[in-house]
Image (cartoon, rainbow, N blue to C red):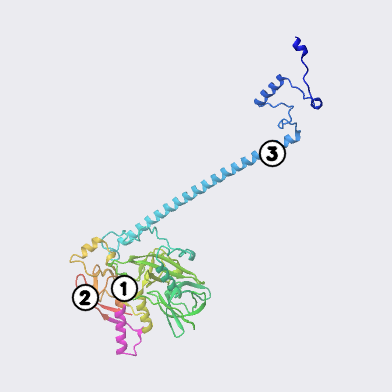
Amino acid sequence: MADTEDREPTFVPQSLSNAVDASPKRREMPVESTIQSSEDYLCGQVPNNTRYNLRGRDVDLATQLRREEHKMDREKCFETKRLRKEQKMREDRECVDKALRARAVLDAQYKAWKEEQRKLRLSKQGGDNNDGDFSGNKGEIINKPPEGSGDWLPYESDDEFGTEFELKHTSWEVEKFTLELARCMVGLESFTDTKIFSCSGTIVEYVDDTGYVVTSASLVRCPDRDEQIDKPKINVWLASGQKLEGFVSNVDFYYNICVIKVPCTVHLPSKSFCPNTGFFNFYENHTRDVVALGRSCEPCSLKVASGKLIPRRSRFDCEELLVSSCKISKRGVGGPLMDFDGNVIGMNFYDKKETPFLPSFIVLKCLQHFDIFGKVIRPLHGLRVKTLYEANLSLLEKKLQSGIPERCGVIVVKVQEPSAELSEIKVGDIITHVDGVPFSNAAELGGILLDMCGKLWLDRQKMNPSDVFNQTAALMSLKVATSQANYCPAIRTW
C-alpha cells in the first residue's frame, strides 16, 4: 500500500491535453443496436434512417402512376411486335401453301394435256400407215432432247431470250466467235400502216455500196397467206444502233428465206454461211454444241442461246429443216445458228415445240438460185421422206435384211401426186443414192435435188436463151438407188 500511495502521477503535456479536450465527442451507439442493423442489412432490409436508402425514398403519387403507365406501354409494345411477327409467319405459310397448290394444279393440268395430246396423236396416226412410223408404235418419241433440258418451253418475250451468262460455261473462243458474228447481225422490222413483223438477219455480202441481208420470209409475208406484202417499209438496225432503210430483193416462201438489200456508203461487215454438210452427219462422232443469235432493234441488243443439235427433222412441211435445243423467242427468227468453231451452220425459225433451222448449205443453194434465176428452182417429186435414223429399230431390222448401207439415206413414208404416176418408188423404200451421189439425211437429199434442178435450167437456158424461167416447168429423169432396186423416176421442177 505504501508503494501505491508514494507513486507519482503520469505526466501529460498541456498541448496534448488541450487537443483531446477540444475534439468533439462521438455519440456512442449501443452494442445491441449495431448488431441488429447488421442483421437487417444482410437480410435485405435496409434501415429507414440510413442516408443510402434510395429505394425507400418517399415519391409522390403522380410519379408512381407515370412509372406504371410507362411499364404498361412497354409491355403493350412488346405484345404488338409479337402479334405482328406471328401474323407475318402465318401469311408466309399461307403464301407458300397457295403456291404449292397452284403448282400442283398446273402439273396435273400439264400431265392431262400431254396425255390428251398423246392419245390424239395416236388416234390420228393410227388410221394412216403411210404417214408415220411403220413399226406400229405411233406414240413413241424418237430422239428426245438431251437429258436435263426439261420440258421444252420457248421464250415468249424478248427479255427472256438469252442472258448475260449464257456462254460463261463455254470457252473464251466461243464468246469471241459470237462477238465477231454479232458485228454482222442486224435487227429488222417491217410495217405498212402498222407494224407487221420483227426479226433478225445476217449480212452475207457487201458489194457496190449495198449490203445483202439473209433473213426469214416472215418479215414480208401476208398474215393470212403465203404472199408478199405490197410495198412494205423495212427498217434495218445495225449493231451500233444506226437505222437504215431496206428493200426486198428475193423471197421464197417454201424455204422461208428472204434477201434484203441495204444501201449504205459505209462498209458493212459480212459473214458467209458454211457450205460443209459433214456437221449434220450424225454417224460421225463430233461435238454438236451450237449457239443461236438474235438482235433487237436497239443498240448493242445481242441475244444468244446455247444448245445442241437434235438428230431429227422439224415437224414443218419443209423436209430440209433440222432441229436444235436452243430456246429462242420470235425475235431470233432469221438469226444465224453458229457452231463452237465459229461457222454459221443455219438460219433459225421459231416454233412452240422446238427450234427448227434451215441448214447453211441449203441457204447457200437458195442464194445461188436467186442470183442466177431470180427464184428457187425446187423439185416437185411428191415424196414424203424422213431420215433413216429416225425410224424404230424394229422397222430397220425388217428393212435392212440384206445389210446396213454405208450411208444412211432416207425412208419413203408417203407418195403423193405428181410422182405417183411417174415413179415406181413405193412407201417403205430406202433411198441411199441419187444419180450415183450418196447422202445421209433428208436435208442432203434436198440439196442434191436443188443442184440438179439448177443444172437442168442452166442447160435449158443454153439451148433456148429466150425461155422464160418463171413461166414454164420441166421434167428431169434421175437414177434413184433404193434398198430394193434402181429406178429412174421423172421428177418435175418448178
Mark 2: secondary structure:
strand
Q: Is residue 119 left or right of residue 222?
A: left
Task: Please provide percent x and percent y for residue 192.
Answer: 51, 76
**Place of residue 108 in the rendered image (x, y in percent of width and height, measured from the top left):** 42, 52
**Could you tell me how far apart the alpha carbons at marks 3 and 2 are, in whole angstroms?**
105 Å
The residue under the point 59% across, 42% down is 83
* Left or right for 494, reference 300: left
Q: Residue at x 39, y 77 (%)?
A: 272
Q: Is residue 464 magenta?
A: yes
Which stretch is magenta?
450-475
Task: From the image, state whether disc 3 or disc 1 is nearer to you.
Answer: 3
Q: Which residue is mark 1?
A: 277
Observer-side mark, 3 or 2, equals 3
Q: Amino acid at mark 2?
A: Tyr
Asked if the residue at tag 1 contacts the one at tag 3, i.e. Cβ–Cβ closer than 8 Å, the answer is no
Q: Looking at the picture, how far across and down is residue 244, in whole percent?
A: 51, 79
* Mark 2–mark 1 distance (CA, rounded to whole Å): 26 Å
- Quarter of the picture holding the N terminus: top right
What element does badge 3 sit on?
Answer: helix
- The tag on residue 70 is 3
Pointer 1 local density, CA inside 10 Å: few below 14, some 14–19, many at least 20 = some
Q: Total number of numbered labels?
A: 3
Disc 2: which residue: 487
Q: Amino acid at mark 1?
A: Thr
User: For the C terminus, which image quadrant?
Assistant: bottom left
Using a 10 Å C-alpha cutoff, classify the residue at mark 2 as few (fewer than 14 neighbours), some (14 to 19) or many (20 or more): some
Residue 453 sits in quarter = bottom left
Asked whether the residues under the numbered discs 3 and 2 touch, taking CB atoms below 8 Å apart as contact, a structural biologist would say no
Name the quadrant containing residue 8.
top right
Q: What's the residue type where badge 3 is placed?
A: His
